[in-house]
Structure formats: structure tokens, C-alpha cells
Amino acid sequence: MMICYNECILSQRGNIVKIKRNQDLHIRKSKQHVVAFIHGIFSSPTQYEELIEQFEKFDYSIYAISLQPHSEDPKEYLNLHKDSWIEQVNETLDLLLRKYENVYIISHSLGGLLSIEYEHINQIKKLVLWAPALKPKVTFKSIRIGFMSSDKHQDDEYLEFCRTKGSVTPRNLAEKAYLLKPTLHLMYNVKNARKKLKDVHIPTLVIISKKDESVQFSTGKLTEKEMDCSEFRLLELKNSYHNDFSEEERELAYTQIIEFITKKEAN
């Protein structure tokens, strides 16, 4: 696998598949099962490249949603309205439910909020919530990384994420000002998702880490308390961050996700 600036390249059963930052990805392998991937704010489908590869040996189709207008130009966010993301997710998931017998969701951060808000969530087969942004963490570090760092800080995790997985790389403070609107819309989605937690009844796996710099660790217990799922699993990690799993925990997380999605339910 090779990672490029605007896309990554996967090998799927001998075929070359390109995952582009700002386009949906659809890999058709099965007419019965499809896994929908929903990324977080300022991210892109390339965030899931390694996890998508993990499904190579399973007969599951893949659909990775690129939330719009997640663009390389921060000015594009001026066209965003508060329901843009949930309308896109509703439309895409409705289409997948019509085309496939079983639809599964793997979501991250904002993607988790949108999954919870999905109007037909209980028609989904299983749900994975990785670092769902139900309780955002506001710290000096998160503010510095989000709005004060610049390209001269080459070691910032935020900038590294933007360069390799993100949909946008703000070059200066003026461009970062354009990110305020989608950030406010994120808080709107936080409020709506918190209200709908109790309405989610499908099997759910929640993954949260103590070192997550953007989401509070107590989010895991919140979901366990508020959600009324037919099956609920909570994976608590110690050394992973918000946008990626640590080296020592990545295999554990991927194994748990794959096992949860592919496990056949008892009759």
C-alpha cells in the first residue's frame, strides 16, 4: 500500500483501488453485506485505509463516505449548513439499505454522532463507534493544535494527520478561521446525538482511549449507561489518540472491530 497526498492506493484481490480524500469509495464484493465507513471532522475516507484492508479476506462490500464539503480549500466550509452532514449520511445509508441485505457502520468522532442521529439507525445490522464525539474535550493542547499551530511546527500530530489522512490542511491562522463554522456545527450534532442515544437498540461496539486528546474518556461509560442496545461492548484503550490507534493497541482494536462485525449472530 502506498499513501499519496490526495489519495491512498489499496490492493484488493489483485486490483488497485484508489481512496481519494474528497470522494466516496465503493468496493463491490457482496450483494448481501456492506460496511459503511463514516469519518470524523476534517478527516476523509483515507483514515480507514488500513481497516478497509482488513476486510480483504471477508466477503463484504465497502462504502466509505466522504462528508461534504470536506475540501482542501477551507473556504468551502462557508457553504456548509447545520444539517448538511446528516442529510448526506441519511441519503447514503438509505441507498445502501435498499441495495444490501445487511448494512454495518464503522464510524469515528463526528461520524459516530451522525450514525447515532441516522433516522433509521435500528435498521442497521451493527454499529462501531470509535471515539464518538459525545463529550468533546477542550484543553489548551487541543486549542493550540487546532488553531495556533502552523506549518513550522512539523511535529504536531494535528498537522501530520492533515497531511496524510485529513481533507484540509490550513496553512495559516486566517485559513483556520474558516474552520470555526464546521466546528460549531459539530457541537450542534453533539447535542442532537446525546438526545438520541437512548433510541439506539442495535449491537454496538464503543472504542475509547484515555489518551484521546479530543474526546473525554468518560464517553465510554456514558454510552454504556444511556444506550439500550441488544448487545453492547466497550473497548477501553490506554495509549491511543483520537485520530489513530497506537502501535501496541492497533492490532487489538482492528481484531475487535473485525470480530464484532463478522461474527454471526446466534439464532
Image (tube, helix red, strand yellow):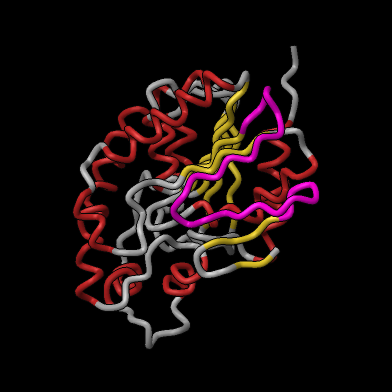
Residue ID at (66%, 52%): 17
Q: Position of residue 7 (x, y in %)?
A: 54, 61
Residue located farthest toward the front when viewing the structure as drawn: 15
- 50 or 74: nearer the viewer: 74
Residue ID at (44%, 41%): 112
The reply, left or right, for residue 209 in relation to residue 247 is left
Q: Is residue 173 above or below residue 188?
A: below
Residue 194 painted magenta: no
The reply, left or right, for residue 118 in relation to residue 46 is left
Residue located farthest toward the bottom when viewing the structure as drawn: 152
Q: Position of residue 44 (x, y in %)?
A: 47, 54
Quarter of the figure with the C terminus: top right
Q: Is residue 164 above or below residue 64?
A: below
Residue ID at (61%, 55%): 18
Q: Is residue 193 above or below residue 101?
A: below
Residue 12 painted magenta: yes
Look at the image and give the residue range highlighted in magenta. Answer: 11-34
Q: Is residue 237 visible?
A: yes
